[in-house]
């Protein structure tokens, strides 16, 4: 019998009989591995354990204890398994249900179903589906792959009353020239599926169904609305429990719930995706802006403001027309004056900044010229992708454009990195992850420019002794960039700041400065944002703190609570005194019991509650109750500012 040789992850060769599968390889290595194996990576591609291995392949057996990419693959396999098992259970419980697609996703899996008329499960049914799934998991039903000619497969699913599957197969044939398709059977259920799967249903360690939502077939709003059931699976119950706990915290901290609850902002149907900021939220935005402005002042930036509405022609010149038109809002001037010009709302601030730079003559002595703008931009996002403050249609960038020479780039990047460190630390994000993205396949500019630009960014990062990841080919088409990410209290990573080099836009806007040699030169342009979107950052902060802002950042720092009407006068006097000392406060003058007032202030997550009645008024004190630490006793109101400052980071 002839043999094949495969290479194991440690580089050692393994000889196997011809036709041997991943399962055979695992068995040859050891019985434990054979038992744990979920799938096999063949030259980096995840496959079924049962598939024969090609001679000379590099293989890795994927198990629940795999690490790195293989760990992701192991989860992917059992989540894919779980999606099929969920479909098995659903079809069993609701006969006549048509199935469509059911992929694994980042945190779990889903499956989209078309339920028979008038029948649609509710969240209350999830437990019933889970119970049916458990039966199939305990039965340890193998996943069996088979291949079928396209014609036969179409016939089979048509007979089974599965029009979605028929459409998928017909598309595969038309778009990819597929002649055969693969099916996977587990127990009573057979699905059209590319695979791979683990050997059997019992490999799904621990699973949970999370929610039900609507989803259009193929994401197309003109097509059938299907019912999507989401779930997740892990190898171990403990991992699932931790994940569910985190989901619960994420739900509690969800800014979309906390925003209206804490009177920060609201969304209204009249303007989808554009938040209405209430007084409390507006204060929060101003406090964030104040921190950004401190960095601007320290680092030689000057602020500008440019119009929101600009002639359409400008967007042709900037290149946005070609690349970005679908995401832009257009406005027509009033016809009253017979004005035929067409205008657009700005989706970016850069062209405005370039017009500012270009309206004056500049010498090399002006460089670097750093123009900052809290610029409101408008982007037409599809309604389906809007997500609270995290994905909106109008937001304010803490934007800046630095015009400089290529030689000046490292020092500028240096300063931007330091600004980011200081700013993020201020908001409680101490660990910043940095990602350098280099030249993409489609790009403008010369090799030399790119090389020097990338070198400039690297130099700046290395000079700071900073660790960074490189994402090859992920830069913008006009230049390389550095992105800055933070991790929040729930362990989620957010990209905030960015720093991008650009040779293209100065070219398009014919920007120039007079050099030492008296000749005209093109400046380089750095686009940079520290927080990105002010609104999105506010949303992230709300979730990071669960709405319990540190005292210095709380829109209302102290709630002044008179125990009864006669003390309102004293309460107002204390309020005025604290206001003069810069403490953001409000007096609760309602005719409610003090217990009720305290409860409401607690719900509003106000850091300090100052209760005052007869004794306090007589002594000229306030009784302080802290949201975080409980009762702090009676004290002179003048001590309140220092209590609030205590938690403020340097
Ligand atoms: Zn599948
Ligand atoms: Zn820009």
Image: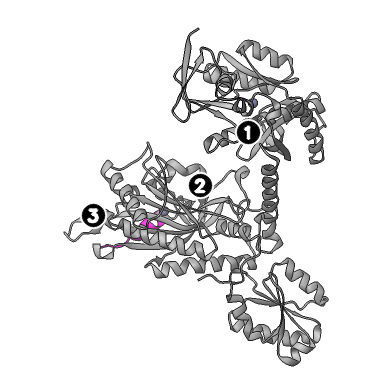
Is residue 239 something that shows in the picture? yes
- Toward the viewer: 316 or 146? 146
Q: For the stretch drawn in magenta, what is the main secondary structure?
A: helix
Q: In the image, is residue 358 part of the stretch drawn in magenta?
A: yes
Disc number placed over residue 379 in the picture, else none? none
Question: Secondary structure beneath disc 2?
Answer: loop
Question: Secondary structure beneath disc 1?
Answer: strand
x%, y% of residue 80? 64, 30
Identify the residue position indicated by label 2 in the image: 328
- Toward the viewer: 230 or 243? 243
- Toward the viewer: 618 or 376? 618
Q: Looking at the image, do the residues carrying marks 3 and 2 touch, with CB atoms under 8 Å apart?
A: no
Of callouts 1 and 2, which one flags the residue occurring earlier in the amino acid sequence? 1
Q: Which residue is drawn at 52% across and 16% down?
A: 177
The span from disc 3 to disc 1 (Cα, nearest Å) is 53 Å
Residue 319, relative to residue 360: is it above or below?
Answer: above
Q: How crowded is mark 3: few (under 14 residues within 10 Å), some or many (20 or more)?
A: some
| Residue closest to the far bottom | 618
Is residue 358 something that shows in the picture? no
Identify the residue position indicated by label 1 in the image: 104
Q: In this view, does 632 lie to the left or right of 405?
A: right
Of marks 3 and 1, the one in the foreground = 1
The span from disc 1 to disc 2 (Cα, nearest Å) is 33 Å
Of callouts 3 and 1, which one flags the residue occurring earlier in the amino acid sequence? 1
**CB at disc 2 and ligand 2 closer than 8 Å:** no
Identify the residue position indicated by label 3 in the image: 521
Magenta part of the protein: which range?
A: 351-363
Q: In this view, does 559 lie to the left or right of 355?
A: right
**In the figure, residue 227 lies in which quadrant?**
top right
Residue 440, relative to residue 520: is it above or below?
Answer: above
The span from disc 3 to disc 2 (Cα, nearest Å) is 32 Å
Q: Residues within 10 Å of mark 2 (few under 14, many from 20)?
A: many
């Amino acid at each position: 019998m002839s043999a094949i040789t495969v290479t194991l992850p440690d580089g050692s060769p393994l000889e196997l009989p011809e036709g041997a599968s991943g399962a055979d390889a695992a068995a040859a290595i050891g019985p434990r591995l054979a038992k744990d194996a979920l799938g096999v990576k063949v030259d980096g591609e995840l496959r079924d354990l049962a598939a024969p291995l090609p001679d000379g392949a590099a293989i890795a057996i994927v198990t629940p204890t795999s690490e790195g990419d293989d760990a992701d693959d192991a989860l992917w396999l059992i989540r894919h398994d779980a999606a099929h098992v969920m479909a098995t259970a659903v079809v069993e419980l609701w006969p006549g249900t048509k199935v469509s697609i059911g992929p694994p996703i980042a945190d779990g899996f889903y499956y989209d179903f078309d339920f028979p008329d008038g029948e649609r499960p509710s969240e209350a049914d999830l437990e019933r589906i889970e119970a049916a799934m458990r039966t199939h998991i305990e039965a340890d039903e193998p996943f069996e792959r088979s291949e079928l000619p396209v014609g036969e497969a179409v016939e089979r699913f048509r007979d089974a009353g599965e029009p979605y599957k028929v459409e998928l197969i017909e598309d595969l044939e038309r778009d990819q020239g597929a002649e055969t398709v693969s099916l996977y059977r587990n127990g009573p259920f057979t699905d059209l599926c590319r695979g791979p799967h683990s050997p059997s249903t019992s490999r799904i360690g621990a699973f949970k169904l999370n929610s039900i939502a609507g989803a259009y077939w193929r994401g197309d709003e003109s097509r059938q609305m299907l019912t999507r059931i989401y779930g997740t699976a892990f190898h171990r119950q403990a991992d699932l429990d931790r994940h569910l706990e985190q989901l619960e915290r994420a739900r509690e901290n969800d800014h979309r719930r906390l925003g209206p609850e804490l009177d920060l902002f609201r969304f209204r149907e009249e303007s989808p995706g554009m938040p209405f900021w209430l007084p409390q939220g507006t204060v929060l935005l101003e406090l964030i802006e104040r921190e950004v402005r401190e960095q601007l002042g320290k680092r030689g930036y000057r602020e500008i403001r440019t119009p929101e509405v600009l002639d359409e022609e400008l967007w042709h010149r900037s290149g946005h027309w070609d690349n970005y038109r679908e995401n832009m809002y257009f406005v027509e001037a009033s016809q009253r004056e017979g004005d035929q010009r067409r205008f657009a709302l700005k989706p970016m601030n850069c062209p405005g900044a370039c017009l500012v730079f270009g309206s004056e003559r500049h010498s090399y002595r002006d460089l670097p010229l750093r123009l900052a703008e809290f610029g409101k931009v408008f982007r037409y996002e599809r309604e389906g992708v809007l997500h609270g403050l995290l994905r909106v249609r109008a937001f304010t960038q803490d934007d800046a454009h630095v015009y400089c020479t290529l030689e000046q780039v490292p020092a500028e990047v240096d300063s931007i990195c330091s600004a980011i460190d200081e700013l993020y630390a201020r908001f409680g994000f101490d660990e910043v992850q940095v990602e350098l993205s280099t030249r993409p396949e489609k790009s403008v500019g010369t090799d030399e420019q790119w090389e020097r630009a990338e070198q400039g960014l690297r130099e700046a990062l290395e000079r700071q002794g900073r660790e960074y990841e490189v994402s090859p080919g992920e830069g913008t088409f006009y230049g390389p960039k550095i992105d800055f990410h933070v991790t929040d209290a729930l362990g989620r990573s957010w990209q905030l700041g960015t720093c991008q080099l650009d040779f293209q836009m100065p070219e398009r806007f014919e920007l120039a400065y007079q050099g030492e040699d008296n000749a005209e030169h093109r400046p380089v342009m750095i686009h940079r944002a520290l927080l990105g979107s002010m609104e999105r950052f506010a949303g992230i902060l709300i979730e990071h703190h669960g709405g319990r802002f540190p005292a210095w950042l709380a829109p209302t720092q102290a709630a002044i609570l008179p125990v009864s009407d006669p003390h309102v006068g004293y309460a107002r006097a204390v309020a005025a005194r604290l206001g003069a000392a810069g403490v953001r406060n409000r007096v609760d003058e309602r005719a409610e019991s003090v217990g009720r007032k305290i409860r409401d202030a607690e719900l509003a997550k106000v850091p300090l509650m100052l209760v005052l009645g007869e004794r306090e008024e007589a002594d000229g004190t306030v009784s302080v109750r802290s949201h975080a630490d409980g009762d702090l006793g009676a004290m002179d109101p003048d001590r309140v500012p220092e209590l609030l400052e205590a938690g403020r980071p340097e």
